[in-house]
Image: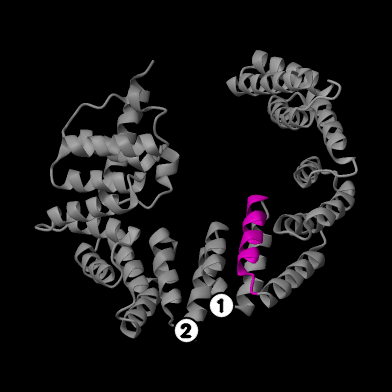
Amino acid sequence: MRVEEGASAGKNQLFHAILLASRGDEQRTQQARNILKGLINQPESKTDDDALRYSIILDQKLRKDRLASGDEKRARELATDILSGFDRLTKRKSPAAMDLAQQVDFLFVLGKIEDIPGILNRLESLVGTTEQSLAFRIRLAHAKREQDRVLEIIRETIAREEAQNRTIRILRLSEILAQQGLQVESVRLLQAAYERNPLYLRPLVEGLLNQGDFQKGFQVCSERSKVDNSPELISVVADFWTASSEWDSNAKEIEAILDGGLKAHPDDAMILESVGSLRLSQFRYEEAFRLLEAANRLSPDSFLTLNNLAIAASEIPGKESLGLSMIDRAIAKYGRMPDLIDSRGLVLLRIGSIREARESFDEAYALLPDPRFRLHRIQVDMAESVEIDPNKIVGSINLDSLRTMKLTPREQTALDQLVALLDKRIQVTP
């Protein structure tokens, strides 16, 4: 009975420490550290490993804060504590794989790469070669400036995974590399995979665009179009032109690719949806409506098709009520998702239902604090000529994020007016 009571008390103390640390202030954080240290040093504690893991997480956060404030001495002390914690978790007969992986990640942060190979070997002896361990090995070779080894790992990985038709593992590895800051290596992996299998076209182009290499992304599509006009290629070209204006300089060639695809596959719902969505982003509403309506006939109730068809209809005189029925149909099928609720607000705004539009934008933003949703809410006030209080806006909308988005003319006008209003406030504030 006493053992059970002790275990329960230990768990309660651990939860208390987590709650204190979540408050964020220095005093409570230190209280949390003291509780965790007590649990770690408690003999035969049932929570000592969990307390140690959370203590490491907390110390890593504190170390970042100390580095940011210039307190390098304290940051070094915390690093020593963290390494000691990892040693305690991993230098045992049967360590947990997650502890070994987190130890490797922290050693990379510190630049102590000489200890990583041995830990990686232990990790792979427990769980085999995983996407994470491969990402670590590529990261290690990169840190050691062994680019030939990076390429060797990539080639070996692709040959092995393709032989077993495990596309998903290559995609997962590229995602992990990008998350670890190795965007170049992620794209190298996708490029090598694409050279063996054109199924990697979309992730490769997406990787290139994320890397900022827009023209290389277009070049890959352009070269592929010379030997392939499959629905997937046409969809990729349309989708990525929709997402970025960086391809505008290639408009003539892109239009030729799209026209060829539509003629070759006039009844392909994926192409119709992608090109229709592109036309919507280009404010060619009649054409967008025609293409999306055809896509909806072929593949009824697609999330993207219904959403974009509703927006297109709301922009065409005489079809506004159809837009509302389409978005309501989408919500009935997919639930009250923030994107759909926001789109409903836009449709309502077009047909003059201002109060309902305001309610939709507020609901969408409450579900997901997207700056575009907040901008739409401000558009409602502008449509009603309501005086906007800058003090209530500052801090509630990410203007920098909005500036990087591809906005509609109405959104851009609202953003420009908002920026001018905020600039005026700054000028008059003493």
Q: Circle 1 sits on which residue?
A: 198
Q: Earlier in the sequence, mark 1 or mark 2?
A: 1
Q: Is residue 129 above or below residue 78?
A: below
Image point (63%, 51%), residue name? 179
**How many residues crowd around disc 1 within 10 Å: few (fewer than 14), some, or many (20 or more)?**
some
The percent position of residue 47, horizontal first and vertical second, equals 76, 27
- Specify whether residue 166 is painted magenta: yes
Q: Do the residues labelled 1 and 2 touch (CB within 8 Å)?
A: yes
Considering the whole magenta stretch, tell me its main secondary structure: helix
Taking 53 as reference, is 344 left or right? left
Please rate how many residues cluster around mark 2, counting C-alpha atoms within 10 Å: few if below 14, some from 14 to 19, many from 20: some
Residue 420 visible in the current orientation: yes
Numbered tag placed on residue 91 in the rendering: none
| Magenta span of residues | 165-180
Q: Which amino acid does label 1 sit on?
A: Pro
Q: Residue at x 75, y 16 (%)?
A: 34
Q: Which residue is drawn at 36% across and 18% down?
A: 429
Q: Position of residue 216 (x, y in %)?
A: 55, 69
Q: Distance between the residues labelled 1 and 2?
A: 10 Å
Work out whether residue 328 or residue 70 is closer to the camera in this orientation and state it: 328
Q: Which of 223 and 372 is in front in this view?
A: 372
